[in-house]
Amino acid sequence: EKNPNTIEEQNQRTSSSTAPRRKPGDKDSAERLLASLQFILALPLTLIYLELVVHFAAFKEINSSFFVYAIFFSIAGGMLMALLCTLFDRKVNYIITLVLLALPTVLCAIQIVYSAFFGDFFAIGMLGMAGNLADYMSNTIKAIFANLHWILILFVPFTLFAIFGRRVIVPHRSTWFLRAVCAVFSVCFFMLGTLYVNNHDEAFGDKFIYREGFLVRDSVERFGVMTTARLELQYMIFGMPEADVGDIPEVLEGEITTAIQG
């Protein structure tokens, strides 16, 4: 005669083996929230990492003012990326994440190589002249190999996301509340960065370079690669902001007055 306890244990094992696997949607909400938060934090940190690598490679030092801009604007951009990367299921979110990470990573790599070769930074408006780079192909290849260590360092986050992202960190579709939080943080940190810019309104200061005195090299040095790309696209589409008389640096204002009197 079989032991009732043994029969009961066999039934439990059979029921557990035939039970359907837990789907991602069945996960505890706290567990899914934790996964989403890890992902959301990883994106701004990645942008900050890219900015610091480029700045150190090009200028060999990182000053406090640039670091503040890198923090504010990278968090703003990273939060916007997080919002876009959590709209769909995990597979689609994974693809979107790789695309959005590849763009700034490649741009930063181009800037490192371009600055090493030309002593300047690549402007988006120069894309139409890209065919002329064939004349410098051998030197460009030399510049790439000379800065290969920086390029490899830049691609570390992208490589980690590509290998482990889908299983470890890229979340499923997030809630509307979490997306709203990302949007609010993005706007708030963008405003903080803009306020910090406006606080530096001295002659040829950050406010002047950010607006009517925009130059790619100065902008990259002061605000970073991604902010410079955003400003360049903004000014290409909407035009450069016109300077008010009160916004003209005192040095330039004196030169203009002298020229008029002369």
Image (cartoon, rainbow, N blue to C red):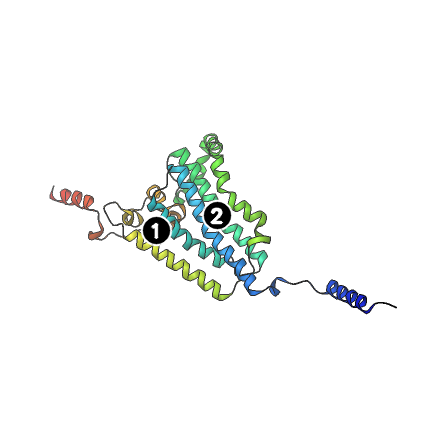
Q: Which is more toward the observer, 208 or 138?
A: 208
* Labels in figure, total: 2
Dot 2: what SS? helix
| Left or right, residue 25 beside residue 186 | right
Residue 172: quarter of image: bottom right
Q: Residues within 10 Å of mark 1 (few under 14, many from 20)?
A: some
Whichever of labels 1 and 2 marks the residue nearer the N terminus, that label is 2
Callout 1 touching callout 2 (CB < 8 Å):
no
Q: Where's residue 9, x and y in %? A: 77, 65
Q: Amino acid at mark 2?
A: Leu
Question: Which mark is in front, 1 or 2?
Answer: 2
Residue 103, disc: 2
Q: Is residue 173 visible?
A: no
180 vs 148: above or below: below
- Which quadrant is home to the N terminus? bottom right
Q: Residues within 10 Å of mark 2 (few under 14, many from 20)?
A: few
Q: Which residue is mark 1?
A: 235
Residue 133, disc: none
Q: Where's residue 3, x and y in %? A: 83, 67
Dot 1: what SS? helix
Q: Where's residue 193, x and y in %? A: 34, 53
| Left or right, residue 251 beside residue 218 | left
133 vs 192: above or below: above
Q: Residue at x 55, y 61 (%)?
A: 32
242 vs 176: above or below: above
Q: Is residue 220 visible?
A: yes
| Left or right, residue 185 beside residue 256 | right
Residue 77: quarter of image: bottom left
- Which quadrant is home to the C terminus? top left
